[in-house]
Amino acid sequence: MPWLTQLASVARKTGYPVTEVGGWKTRGHGPQQAVQGVVCHHTAGWNDRHIVVNGRPGLDGPLSHFWLQHTGRIWVVAAGRCWHNAPSTSSQHMNSTSIGIEAENDGKTAWPQVQLDAYEALCAELCREFGLPASRVKAHREVNTGKPDPHSINMTTFRGHVAALITHPGTPTRQEEDDVPEVISLGAGEDQDVPASGEMAVSWHTEYADDPPGHSADGVAIMAATARWCIVDGLVKVRGLKPGSEIDVAWSRYDRDGKEFDDNAWRLSFRADVNGRVETSVGGQFALNSKNQLRLRVINPTSSDAVVEKVTMAKISMFKR
Ligand SMILES: [Zn+2]
């Protein structure tokens, strides 16, 4: 087998970003004699592409054909033979017979999802290119005694995803499996009035979310981009009421524009304490979609103007449905 100058185009089939390291098509310890397997590694460091390209004291580069950045970007390092696995306990996973992928990780930090997804996709495209079954994808630790890498990856699960991707390229795997909710935490941020014989919807001034899935910041509406099951928990604090008087707190659904009231997912009554305060949490579970929105309302039928305090907050967990 000659130099593997198709590796960049194979990598691009994954859909993940690819960068070709200058000179990669002629980089290698001679040509690659055969491709019968793929070996997965972690680099045991960060920002260490130069080591994979150039080597380290006692071991000349290139060390592997790919360097897989923690962002999911695939760097093509070499088209020839690389020093990534010797001695090997598998004849199909020697330097002369296999492709090496060095994934950027210090050997203990949890893998970013995007990097794991790119890792599986790259292995699958390599299997497709070289006619290999997913069983030929091995962890370094599986084909070299005493090696720990890649850490914490269950290779049975990993190969299962690779097998699915060989058959159906582009199929998302982990996201569907894990069903991790999107969590939004909202804070009122400042005191807000709820007039006597009136009502208000809490305005959210602060939000805590890495990647908001779609809701109005600095407004009353909580929205989902697409259909979601939501578990909500609102912690409401109201002051200024007459002791013993009652107010209602409700999670209510409206149409998307907020003009038409739809229903109260939850509406409960609470009695003010001797200091004229209500401190309560109201939770519920219901569906949101692209046509509605959710508000946390405080309904005050009493004759006292009251204040919804700034420490009022809500946590919303959104699950795909
Ligand atoms: Zn390794």
Image: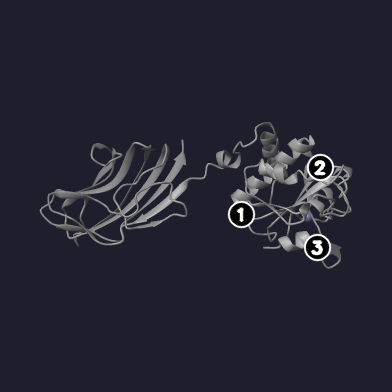
Residue at mark 3: 55
- Tell me if residue 248 can be seen: yes
* Among the two numbered marks 2 and 1 on one chain, the one whose residue lies closer to the N terminus: 2
Q: Is mark 3 on a helix, strand or loop?
A: strand
Q: Within 10 Å of the Cα at label 1, are there few (<14), some (14-19), or many (20+) other Cα atoms?
A: some
Check the picture and name the quadrant holding the N terminus: top right
Q: Which of marks 3 and 2 is in front?
A: 3
Q: Which amino acid does label 2 sit on?
A: Gly
Q: What element carries label 2?
A: strand
Q: Where is residue 129 in the image (x, y as percent from the top left)?
A: 76, 37
Q: Residue at the location (67% across, 38% down)?
A: 161
Q: Is mark 2 within 8 Å of ligand 1?
A: no
Q: Which amino acid does label 1 sit on?
A: Thr
Q: Real-space Cα distance between discs 2 and 1?
A: 25 Å
Looking at the image, is 150 positioned above or below residue 262?
below
* Among the two numbered marks 3 and 1 on one chain, the one whose residue lies closer to the N terminus: 3
Residue at mark 1: 71
- Tell me if residue 134 can be seen: no
Q: Which amino acid does label 3 sit on?
A: Gly
Q: Position of residue 132 (x, y in %)?
A: 79, 36
| Outermost residue, bottom side | 57
Q: Position of residue 26 (x, y in %)?
A: 82, 53
Q: Which mark is residue 37?
A: 2
